[in-house]
Image: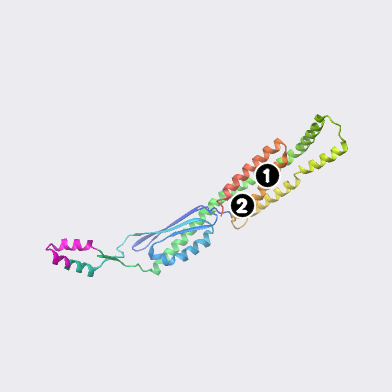
């Protein structure tokens, strides 16, 4: 099944005192380019998250984020009472002022507040982990839906190339007649006597050089192989890319051998279809 590398998945986990938003975005890339942004409290789980993402997403430029919004009374910042009381005592020795003003000044001084390191709550993490799995499921579904659209486009374009290849076969008979007549005319215009047997031998040798039978067979084989891989169980954009390169080689050889305007016109159409396939393959997993 064809999968796109473009995808998006989002899940919100509502905890008693906080709302956790999990977001995954991905774009196309040659390899897995993973960027993970998570709060400090969950840093010890980063390697687990990365392994899970790499297993399911395989390839692409992936951005994973966890955002925390505190909705209850939970906080990791507390008043450093010992420091504040010490400041107040020192301020009272210096100047006479109200208790409110003394406290206000003390609270603005260094180290009046301290941040306690948040400890990972395993029960809380289990809920977040389930949310991560849900977000991964959503982005994989998104990728498959996008991949289905790409697959239909590939099928249409491969069928177009096949149709144009059949048209080349039809044109080929007229091409050979045209080449033969062109060579006869060239010799006639020289106004010299030639050995007709030798001329026919040379003509046959030249026509064999222009024969495109092998290219047509190989092109058909490559097109069939592309369709077989496209309908396979796994998505393999790199392999499809290699096959498209082989298709391109055969089309280019047809163009170089054609030596006939109507055939060259068809070959250009084939190249156009293949270029559009190659562009889309850059986004296939």
Residue pictured at 39% horizontal, 66% vertical? 124
First in sequence: mark 1 or mark 2?
A: 2
Task: In this rendered view, identify the residue nearer to me: 88 or 145.
Answer: 88
173 on left or right of 73: right
Rendered location of residue 279, percent (x, y)? 57, 47
In magenta segment, residue 107? yes
Q: Tell me how far mark 1 sits from mark 2, CA to CA.
A: 16 Å
Q: How many marks?
A: 2
Tell me if I can see residue 230 in this picture: no
Q: Does 89 appear above or below 23?
A: below
Disc number for residue 252: 1
In terms of depth relative to the viewer, which is nearer, 121 or 190?
190
- In the image: residue 13, left or right of residue 83: right
Residue depth check, mark 1 versus mark 2: number of the one nearer the observer: 1
Q: Secondary structure at mark 2?
A: helix
Does residue 260 show up?
A: yes
Work out whether residue 132 or residue 39 is closer to the camera in this orientation and state it.
Answer: 39
Q: Quadrant of the N terminus?
A: bottom right
By secondary structure, the bulk of the magenta-drawn segment is best described as: helix
Residue 241, which numbered label? 2
**Residue 185 got which mark?**
none
Q: Residue at x 88, y 38 (%)?
A: 197
């Amino acid at each position: 099944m064809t999968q796109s590398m473009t995808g998006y998945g989002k899940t919100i986990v509502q905890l008693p005192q906080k709302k956790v938003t999990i977001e995954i975005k991905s774009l196309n890339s040659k390899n897995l380019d993973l960027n993970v942004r998570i709060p400090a409290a969950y840093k010890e789980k980063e390697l687990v998250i990365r392994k899970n993402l790499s297993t399911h997403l395989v390839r692409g430029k992936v951005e994973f984020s966890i955002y925390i919004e505190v909705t209850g009374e939970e906080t990791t910042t507390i008043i450093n009472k010992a420091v504040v009381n010490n400041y107040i005592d020192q301020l009272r020795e210096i100047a006479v002022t109200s208790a409110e003003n003394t406290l206000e000044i003390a609270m603005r001084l260094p180290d009046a507040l301290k941040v306690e390191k948040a400890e990972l709550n395993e029960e809380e993490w289990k809920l977040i982990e389930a949310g991560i799995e849900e977000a991964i499921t959503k982005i994989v579904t998104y990728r498959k839906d996008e991949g289905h659209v790409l697959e239909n486009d590939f099928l249409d374009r491969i069928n177009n190339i096949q149709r144009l290849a059949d048209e080349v076969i039809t044109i080929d008979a007229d091409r050979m007649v045209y080449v033969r007549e062109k060579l006869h005319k060239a010799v006639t215009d020289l106004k010299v006597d030639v050995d007709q047997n030798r001329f026919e031998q040379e003509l046959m040798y030249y026509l064999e050089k222009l024969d495109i039978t092998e290219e047509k067979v190989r092109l058909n084989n490559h097109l069939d192989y592309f369709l077989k891989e496209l309908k396979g169980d796994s998505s393999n954009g790199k392999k499809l890319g290699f096959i498209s390169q082989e298709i391109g080689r055969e089309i280019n050889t047809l163009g170089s051998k054609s030596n006939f305007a109507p055939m060259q016109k068809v070959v250009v159409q084939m190249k156009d279809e293949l270029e559009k396939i190659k562009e889309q393959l850059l986004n296939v997993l």
